[in-house]
Image (cartoon, coloured by chain):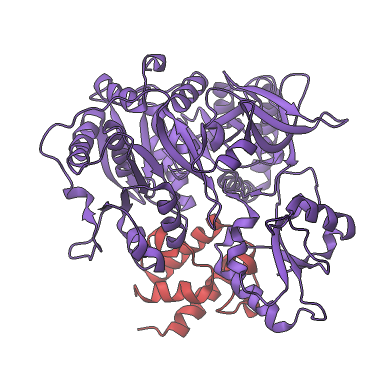
């Protein structure tokens, strides 16, 4: 792999990668039952450099921002490479957001250029806020012939005739602005530098090395810090291959393992649980004698791999299961949200090495990682190289807020000095997660200190961000909380959102209002919906600026109401 | 050509069978995530069953943000 200490920017490291492994395959684009394309590093460069040239000719200057809204596919990485080559700042946005949210984040990020897939662009052009967009150039990929691009130009035709000029950046320049979450008035745009990424990549690669022939299956959206690292920077700087699937149907994910002999895949807990369910169903369908035999082999494997993984042995003992995973799988990396120990244990018992970790976008992906030596399903592992962890304000059990200091910590939240000052205190990133470091240096997590939830898909949701959706309902005042923020449970799973309703004096909640709440709730994407409501009959505490004092209110509710007061919505 | 009612009815039948859910309790306006208690990947699995049944192909993005049977039926109907 490349020695990343030598480089000042992602653009420079990636450019060298292309020269280093010209004939190795860097990208495979697969779709359902066929392969769409395959690119070598040389061909990747031939696709990306004319795009970089056209960007430069269009007036795109070093430090200018270009947003990408695309599903996982080669054009995502080709575009990102071109932006870095031209000295730009990348703003990767989650393609699963709504069109209105896309427009909001585009405005917040002040991106001049947008690179977007046609179906997503079509949705954006139909949103009311579209007329106010300030994008200078929109590059639309895969638009059908004769499609109305609403001012956009075809990505495939946006090519400069001359060779582009490589624009060097320094390590402290911004590489990306990544939204860790937050729309609805509170966008949290993490400003990450080239140094943040190069340091993180150098720290994680020794644990998960890439080489020509190693293959990463890219499932988590590439805008997410995990896939950007595992499905772009790490494989490219090691000469590996990224396999993109144009569908996320579980059956095609399973097929891809064997078809492409995958070496690594990063998953969010939701995907892992789906894989687990599929395997369990298969095990349950076995004839009793075979099932008994399988259980015995799993027992043997479990006993022999407790101290450290023994992939060769596990593959021999549980041949059929490993065949289904392609036979060359070195690690399934799970992150983005908390994974239940039972799920991790299930995979470990069948000899599939699951590396669970803990991280956040603000720290540029991984903070801790389990090294499986020995296997510990109850922790998120030890700090990765270069990470310092401190537990702030520990209670009698040693549990306090996890704070992190490292070269990978973001420089700031974009245009939000107040939130930045709350989050980075004396150089320490306050994660808002509650944890404890045990005698062996492993970090254990026990819930959240801040009012937020993380879904099994790895999405951070700040309750206040979804309050907009309930604006104007017929109550005196209302707000949304994470149920665990009001009623701490010291748990990281099964998190829910709760709507707190303060009716007008003398009024109760009538059917009309409840129907309206259900209707508004249904407008939200399924993972953002509130689970229920509680009725609160006192005025919300507010500060001089009339903002709700959420911590005080949560404390009052928690004291006077039980979690069982929550009525399902 | 099937009517939208027929399409919706067939979707409800298939969902009930696939997720072992009482058919009588499913309505076109239901939120399938909530009613069936499924996650987004299970919803994609259901989609594959529906594609096979109706002989259509729906890209993943067509169902992004869709959570009720009726809207799903309309998306499928548009491709029949």
* Residue A353 in view: no
> Left or right: A386 with respect to A47?
right
Image quadrant where one finds the C terminus of chain A: bottom right
Q: Position of residue A547 (x, y in %)?
A: 68, 57
Rendered colour, chain A? purple
Task: Look at the picture and state if B73 lies above or below A90.
Answer: below
Tell me what residue is drawn at x 47 percent, y 71 percent: B72
Please tell me which residue is depicted at 69% across the width and 41% down the height of the picture. Answer: A340
- Say if A42 sits above or below A275 in the image: above
x and y percentages locating residue A166 in the rendered image? 23, 27
Q: Which chain is red?
A: B
The front one of A25 and A499 is A499
Total marks shown come to 0
Find residue A177 and report its image quarter: top left
> Residue A285: percent from the left, percent from the top?
62, 51
**Among the 4 quarters of the image, the one containing residue A557:** bottom right
**At which x and y percent is residue A103?**
41, 58
Q: Viewed as shown, does residue B33 lie left or right of A87?
A: right
| The N terminus of chain A lies in quadrant | top left
Above or below for A250 versus B57? above
Whether residue A269 is visible: yes
- Foreground of the two, A129 or A466: A129
Residue at left offset 58%, top offset 64%: A468
Q: Residue at x 41, y 85 (%)?
A: B3
On screen, residue A100 versus residue A343, left or right, reads: left
């Amino acid at each position: 792999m490349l020695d990343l200490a030598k480089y000042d920017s992602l653009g420079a490291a990636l450019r060298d990668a292309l020269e280093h492994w010209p004939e190795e395959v860097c990208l495979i684009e697969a779709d359902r039952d066929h392969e769409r394309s395959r690119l070598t590093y040389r061909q990747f460069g031939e696709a990306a450099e004319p795009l970089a040239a056209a960007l430069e000719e269009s007036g795109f200057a070093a430090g200018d921002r270009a947003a990408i809204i695309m599903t996982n596919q080669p054009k995502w990485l080709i575009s990102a490479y071109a932006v870095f080559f031209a000295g730009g700042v990348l703003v990767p946005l989650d393609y699963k957001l709504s069109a209105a949210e896309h427009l909001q984040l585009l405005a917040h990020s002040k991106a001049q250029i947008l690179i977007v897939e046609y179906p997503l662009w079509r949705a954006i052009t139909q949103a009311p806020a579209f007329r106010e967009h300030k994008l200078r150039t929109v590059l639309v990929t895969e638009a059908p012939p004769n499609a109305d691009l609403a001012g956009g130009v075809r990505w495939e035709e946006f090519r400069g005739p001359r060779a582009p000029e490589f624009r060097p950046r320094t390590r402290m320049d911004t590489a990306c602005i990544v939204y860790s979450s937050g729309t609805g008035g509170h966008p949290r745009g993490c400003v990450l530098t080239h140094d943040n990424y190069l340091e993180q990549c150098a720290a994680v690669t020794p644990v998960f090395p890439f080489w020509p022939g190693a293959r990463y299956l890219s499932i988590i959206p590439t805008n997410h810090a995990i896939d950007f690292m595992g499905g772009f920077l790490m494989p490219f700087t090691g000469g590996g291959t990224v396999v993109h699937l144009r569908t996320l149907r579980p059956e095609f994910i399973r097929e891809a393992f064997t078809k492409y002999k995958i070496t690594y895949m990063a998953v969010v807990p939701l995907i892992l649980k789906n894989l687990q369910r599929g395997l369990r169903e298969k095990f349950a369908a076995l004839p009793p004698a075979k099932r008994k035999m399988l259980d015995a082999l799993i027992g043997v494997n479990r006993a022999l791999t407790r101290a450290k993984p023994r992939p060769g042995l596990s593959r021999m003992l549980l041949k059929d299961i490993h065949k289904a995973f392609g036979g060359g799988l070195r690690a399934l990396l799970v992150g983005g949200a908390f994974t239940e120990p039972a799920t991790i244990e299930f995979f470990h018992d069948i000899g599939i090495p699951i590396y669970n970790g803990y991280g956040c976008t603000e720290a540029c992906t991984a903070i801790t990682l389990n090294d499986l030596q020995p296997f510990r399903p109850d922790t998120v592992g030890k700090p990765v190289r270069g990470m310092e962890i401190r537990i702030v304000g520990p209670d009698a059990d040693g549990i306090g807020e996890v704070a992190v200091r490292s070269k990978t910590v973001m420089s700031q939240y974009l245009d939000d000095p107040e939130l930045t000052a709350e989050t980075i205190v004396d150089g320490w990133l306050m994660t808002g997660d509650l944890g404890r470091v045990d005698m062996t240096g492993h970090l254990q997590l026990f819930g959240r200190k801040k009012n937020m939830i993380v879904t099994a898909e790895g999405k951070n949701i700040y309750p206040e961000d979804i309050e907009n959706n309930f604006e104007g309902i017929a109550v005196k005042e209302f707000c949304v909380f994470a149920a665990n923020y009001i009623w701490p449970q010291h748990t990281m799973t099964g998190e829910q959102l709760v709507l707190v309703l303060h009716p007008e004096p003398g009024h109760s909640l009538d059917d009309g209002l409840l129907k309206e709440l259900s209707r508004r709730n249904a407008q939200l994407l399924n993972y953002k919906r509130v689970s229920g409501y509680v009725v609160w009959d006192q005025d919300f505490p507010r500060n001089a600026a009339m903002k709700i004092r959420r911590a005080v209110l949560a404390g009052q509710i928690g004291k006077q109401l039980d979690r069982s007061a929550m009525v399902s919505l | 050509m099937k009517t939208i009612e027929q399409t919706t009815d067939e979707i409800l039948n298939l969902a009930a069978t696939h997720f072992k859910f009482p058919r009588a309790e499913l309505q076109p306006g239901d939120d399938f995530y909530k009613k069936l208690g499924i996650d987004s990947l299970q919803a994609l699995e259901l989609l594959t069953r529906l594609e096979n049944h109706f002989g259509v192909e729906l890209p993943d993005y067509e169902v992004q943000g869709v959570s009720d049977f009726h809207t799903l039926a309309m998306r499928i109907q548009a491709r029949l």
